[in-house]
Image: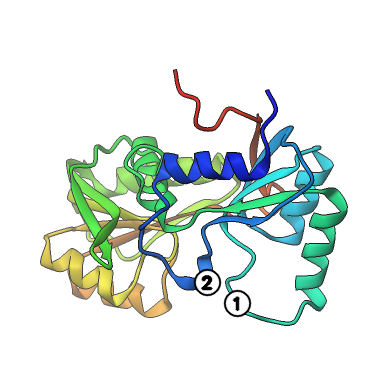
């Protein structure tokens, strides 16, 4: 089957509900860079870095799906690192597709629900709304928080990282949790957690002060961090797989 970048991008747009989803302007969801095509191999990475682009090229992929696209810094001269990334894309004929908040929030394919599944948690409530749309998820459990931290650490170590947490009181149990991947620890999410009786927030990162603020609000923050700099790509999948579910 022959698939061109624009057609595949439209399929992904429909699959994860890009149209109308609130988003930061710099995210620029959708097809960010076209190519001659057609698509014959797909790669996925968190960031559209030069390292990820090079790895995709080395694997023979010509359609790169990323969570953080090429334009987070806004309009800028095509010099230095920006020039190097674009030059490598053009020379390797690689198209780039980016999906940020729509991928975080999707109820089936989203980063938050998939992380919950990996940790054995079942989402039942929304969390971390952005312009009225819940980006994160939450739910109920009755698990020692130390055990949940161990599960998060095991998950992180499978990807070359390790988990960390803010202060965990002795005997603390996670009875109401929330997940907001990425930079999900902030004063806003901690206030929301306190207001909704969330006792454990699982997220990717946050400012230093949130680790100090969390215990004062009765919240434990767990950071299952992936620090594997040698593996910038997720497994490669054949073109045409996306959007075709049986």
Disc 2 crowd rating (10 Å Cα; few below 14, some 14-19, many 20+) is: some
- Horizontally, residue 49 falls left or right of residue 216, namely right
Do labels 2 and 1 touch, CB within 8 Å? yes
Q: Which residue is mark 1?
A: 73
For image coordinates 83% across by 56% down, the residue present is 90
Name the disc covering residue 26, or none. 2
Disc 1 crowd rating (10 Å Cα; few below 14, some 14-19, many 20+) is: few
For image coordinates 24% across by 37% down, the residue present is 122
Residue 166 image point, x, y percent: 34, 65
Residue 188 occupies which quadrant of the picture? bottom left
Please state, as top left, top right, bottom left or bottom right, where the N terminus lies in the image: top right
Q: Which label's residue is closer to the chain start, 2 or 1?
A: 2
Residue 75 occupies which quadrant of the picture? bottom right
Please state, as top left, top right, bottom left or bottom right, where the C terminus lies in the image: top left
Residue 29 image point, x, y percent: 51, 58
How many numbered marks have been drawn onto this rendered protein structure?
A: 2
For image coordinates 25% across by 53% down, the residue present is 178
Q: Is residue 174 visible?
A: no
Structural distance between the alpha carbons of marks 2 and 1? 7 Å
Q: Secondary structure at mark 2?
A: helix
Residue extending farthest to the top is 246
Q: Is residue 145 above or below residue 108?
A: below
Name the disc covering residue 105, or none. none
């Amino acid at each position: 089957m022959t698939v061109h970048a624009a057609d595949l991008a439209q399929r992904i747009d429909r699959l994860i509900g890009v149209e109308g989803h609130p988003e930061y302007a710099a995210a620029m969801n959708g097809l960010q860079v076209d190519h001659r095509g057609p698509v014959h191999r797909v790669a996925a990475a968190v960031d559209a870095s030069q390292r990820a682009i090079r790895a995709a090229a080395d694997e023979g992929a010509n359609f790169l799906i990323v969570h953080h696209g090429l334009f987070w810094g806004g309009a800028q001269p095509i010099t230095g690192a920006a020039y190097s990334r674009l030059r490598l894309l053009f020379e390797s004929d690689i198209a780039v597709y980016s999906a940020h908040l729509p991928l975080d929030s999707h109820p089936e394919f989203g980063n938050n629900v998939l992380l919950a599944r990996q940790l054995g948690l079942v989402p039942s409530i929304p969390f971390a709304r952005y312009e009225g749309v819940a980006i994160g998820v939450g739910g109920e459990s009755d698990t020692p928080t130390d055990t949940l931290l161990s599960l998060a650490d095991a998950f992180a170590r499978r990807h070359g990282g390790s988990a960390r947490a803010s202060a965990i009181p002795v005997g603390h149990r996670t009875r109401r949790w929330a997940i907001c991947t990425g930079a999900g620890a902030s004063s806003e999410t901690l206030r929301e957690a306190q207001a909704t009786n969330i006792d454990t927030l699982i997220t990717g990162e946050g400012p230093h002060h949130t680790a100090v603020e969390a215990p004062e609000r009765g919240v434990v923050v767990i950071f299952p961090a992936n620090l594997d700099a040698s593996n910038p790509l997720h497994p490669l999948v054949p073109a045409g797989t996306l959007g075709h579910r049986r």
